[in-house]
Amino acid sequence: MKEPLLQVQDIRMVFRNKKQEFAAVDGLSFQVERGEILGIVGESGSGKTMASLSIMGLLPEQGAIASGSIKYQGRELVGLSDAEMCKIRGKEISMIFQEPIMSLDQVFTVGNQLMEGILTHEKMSREEAQKRALEMLNLVGIPSPERVFHSYPFELSGGMCQRVMIAIALSCNPTLLIADEPTTALDVTVQAQIMDLLKKSRDKFNIGIILITHDLDVVKDMADRIIVMYGGNMMESATREQLFSNPAHPYTRGLLRAIPRLDTGDERLFNIEGTVPDIRNMPAGCHFCTRCWNAQERCKTQRPQLVEIESGHFVACHLAAEGRKEGEAV
Ligand SMILES: Nc1ncnc2c1ncn2[C@@H]1O[C@H](COP(=O)(O)OP(=O)(O)OP(=O)(O)O)[C@@H](O)[C@H]1O
Ligand SMILES: [Mg+2]
């Protein structure tokens, strides 16, 4: 059988101090194929970035993958040496980082940074690499590639910087791109342009994309499948159609109600009160129980398992799973 492009299985990623460990990601599983866009959605602190840094092998010093498996084209990435990971990172799997500081260096020109990646991974002369770099800037819709090639990042707008980061990420023909909140700092028009660019890149290169955002609206027109994370756990996993037509987890429903309904003219925003608990202070049962309007006693003590409520649609909620079996809404 053909191996999936990326298969993540039951990952547990923890921060350790001398005495204890705290999970920032626990029980995350998914797969991504070429040509597919997977959306990962959740509020701040849900574990989205730690999940992507786990795949890239770039966890912070005190962080580690405690268990689980991450396979890229059938090859296990967990436990690979840094030297091995370096060959994959930026070449096979590339990432657009949430923190600009991890992406663009202010003291080098755009051209310099583009060429560095290309020369690291491809057997090319400097002239060929420069040609490829200019092609990439053109491809991501930068109006005067020659000028931007010689510019420093601080001379460019936020939207242009984001395009440059996408150009760098795509410059070595990766098969998988992880985009961590690629548009959060941009205004709405530029956001739409960047999303369009990601979609076109998927179509042109047939790459798999993991698109991370706190905003369900962003993945609404983009993702084939969506995972909703909360407090490091996977709360719901479904196709885009299933998630928007039949959201099962109270948290997903809360997030959906937070999307302003422009079509009905109803501008009231529903907010789920409170914030994601700190990883050092997660409830024993369902991580969402402290904010859930339906929470019962067992929700506080028993962590719900993922249950398949319709083909390919999974939810981790005691009540949603039972309600759906009886055909009721929660
Ligand atoms: N270096 C660190 N040491 C200890 N805990 C950390 C560290 N970095 C992140 N965490 C914790 O791990 C959890 C998950 O963080 P993560 O950055 O993955 O969230 P996120 O979903 O990406 O949030 P955001 O939307 O704000 O980017 C949070 O509770 C965070 O406080
Ligand atoms: Mg993040």
Image (tube, grey):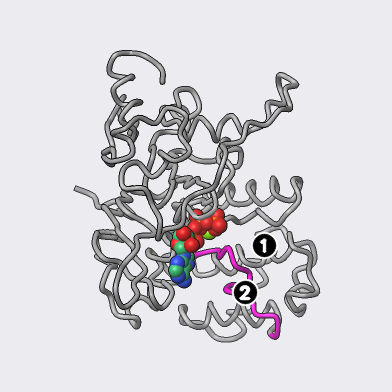
Is 101 magenta? The answer is yes
Q: Is mark 1 within 8 Å of ligand 2?
A: no
Residue underneath mark 1: 162
Q: Is residue 277 above or below residue 148?
A: above
Q: Is residue 38 above or below residue 131?
A: above
Quadrant for residue 137, please give it.
Answer: bottom right
The image position of residue 294, as x and y in percent, is 42, 27
The image position of residue 268, as x and y in percent, is 71, 27
- Specify the quadrant that holds the C terminus: top left
Give the residue type at disc 2.
Answer: Ile
Magenta range: 95-107
Is residue 174 visible in the rendered image? The answer is no
Residue underneath mark 2: 101
Residue that sits furthest to the front in the current view: 297
Q: In the picture provided, is 171 more to the left or to the right than 281?
A: right
Q: Is residue 67 above or below residue 227?
A: below
Q: In the picture provided, is 218 more to the left or to the right than 50?
A: right
Give the residue type at disc 1.
Answer: Gln
Q: Earlier in the sequence, mark 2 or mark 1?
A: 2
The image position of residue 43, as x and y in percent, is 53, 48
State which mark lies toward you, 2 or 1. 2
Assign the magenta stretch its main secondary structure: loop
Q: Which one is in front, 68 or 19?
A: 19
Residue that sits furthest to the top in the current view: 327
* Label 2 – label 1 distance at C-alpha: 12 Å
